[in-house]
Amino acid sequence: MGAGAGWHLGGRTQHLPCVICHGSGCLSLACLAPPWCSTVVSISSPVSPPQKLTFTGKCRLTCLYGAVQVFGFTITQDQPSYDLFSPQTHCALTIEAVSYETLEQSKKEMRISARAMLRAHHVPRDARIKLMKNFAPLCSVVLLDGLDTSVTRFILNHPEFSHIFRVKRQSGSCFTPEDAALASTGIGKRDPESGLLLSESSVSAIEELIQACCEEDDGCPVILVCGPKSIGKSTFNRYLINLLLNHLPCVEYLECDLGQTEFTPPGCVSLINVSEPCLGPPFTHQRMPRKMVYYGETSCDQDTERYIDTVKYVFNSYKKELPLVINTMGWVKGVGLLLLIDIIRLLAPSHIVQISVEDFKDMPRFTPEYINLAAGLHTKGKLQGKCKSMDVSGMEDWKQYEGESDFQTSTTGHKLLCVQPKFPGAGNAGEARVHSSILRDMAMLGYLGQLQPLETRSVRPLHSLIPYQVPFNAVALRVIHTDVAPTHILYSVNASWVGLCRILDEVRCPTDGPVLLTQTPVCDCLGFGIIRGVDMERKLYHILTPVPPENLRLVNSLLLGTITIPDCVFTNQQGTEGEIPYVTSEYNYDISGAGKLKMKKHLKRREHSRS
């Protein structure tokens, strides 16, 4: 099913170089002459406390000499350039000098080598002279270029997000030549406290995990990271992955957090092979996973069994040939805690990283003994020790979850690593930099930004792009989160976000559709799209999607969930006159049925229901 069978189409960045040298003194800069609009910067060597450049903005970094580290990932002079994204919405990135092998070169030989590298990158003579005055042994030199991508242009084109890469200047602070030089590259210096802050427990846990992944004495480590909301799980995962990529060619990543996904739009469980460092937040690295299922909601509280089936389906694609990092939801209270116990039993990690603040009482320590003994939402605990003295009469009548045989109810034990975060406001969702719903919108905009043509610098509105035309009878439809009358189904899918999926059953319809699924399948998701129109006369869906045609040929079902297109996509439609399509300000929430009705299918826990 695709561009040849059902899917039919209905038609270099400006460089602002900046060189940073980790030299022997304070930060010094030299603007390169026009037409470069460029800057040279010197920073101190790692022999003394290493100098750092913490910044907000975006740029492309090329290491010309030595080595630097950015968010855990080490970049050397023989590596390609890397794009760095440091928005206000996340902790700022830091460029830091690190030690490297010098091959027993003399200071003179080092200077000759560094000067030759600067010439090779066409750094003007005046800038080279100023740079070499601050050159010292074991220093590092990097080139920073201004960065402008189609994805960031698309996001910044929305007024709500136009400021995310701007530097917030403190009142009363003067704008120095150093600031002007950095600004010419598109970045602004920040206080080091704005960057990543690692506690001693974080450093200790990371060192142990890296050692386990490199040695693999007990097979490939499976690392599960858990903790409450806004505790820093995603930041920890990105930093850990970057550090692992310094030693390994790639790492596997299992995303189990529906609300804050790392590499995909929200509402997905996915398994992805990560071979490139994460040098920005999720909206800057939206990628196609190796395996993905569209769950369709940002929380699984309405159907925990389907969530477990989804995680199990995706996890079965893990081949145990590479270390695996698992991200989990921040729902760790009440039913969420019980569900997390089930997930731990299902995935059987070798290491659990439990991140929490010291006074957090809702989450017990996940020791191997606790995981063995505690009852989950759909699984039983193993009766040991003092539990044997409990009255368990009638235990044989407890109903099991259908798939409980797949759970590791008797584990060999995992290594528990407890981490207490260092950053202010850890674990307090109310003090988060940005609300989780805004981060989800940004991830979706990052995905939709892939629709922008690469050959033009101007941003094209989505309604100006040519959609695919898909016959009603070429794909099956399913609304995941609620029941919709067949006569209303096309109203619900119009102007909606849909998962482009592949079910194993052949889609057959004797008429011209639409084809409706009676149950929500757990199936492969190949990407996402927007149904931007429904042609009732020609029986066609008009779908915008960045999924390549070769993958669209496999799509035979469209799944619609509670994930909605960001409001800014509708309100910022350029070139429209009068009322904006799909936007109203006269909606009455007092009308019966206007609100969202939730049906919690886990309300009666199966394990504790008596027959």
Image: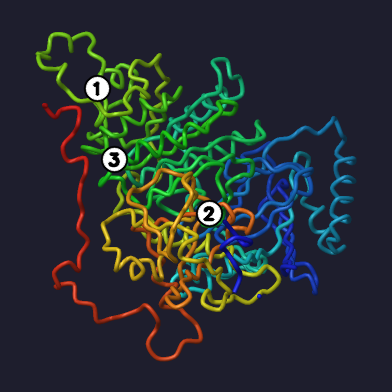
Mark 3 or mark 2: which is in front? 2
Whole-angstrom CA distance, mark 3 to mark 1, is 16 Å
Instruction: Name which of mark 2 and mark 1 comes first in the sequence.
Output: 1
Q: Secondary structure at mark 3?
A: helix
Q: Front-most of 49 and 559?
A: 559
Whole-angstrom CA distance, mark 2 to mark 1, is 39 Å
Q: Secondary structure at mark 1?
A: loop
Whole-angstrom CA distance, mark 3 to mark 2, is 26 Å
Which residue position is annotated with label 2? 555
Q: Is residue 263 above or below residue 371?
A: below
Q: Front-most of 35 and 505?
A: 505
Task: Identify residue type, mark 3.
Answer: Thr
Q: Is residue 94 left or right of residue 542?
A: right
Q: Which mark is residue 380?
A: 1
Q: Is residue 343 above or below residue 369?
A: below
Q: Are marks 3 and 2 in contact (CB under 8 Å)?
A: no
Q: Are marks 2 and 1 in contact (CB under 8 Å)?
A: no
Q: Residue furthest front?
A: 510
Estimate the x, y position of residue 395 in percent, counting from the top left.
15, 17
Instruction: Name which of mark 3 and mark 2 comes first in the sequence.
Output: 3
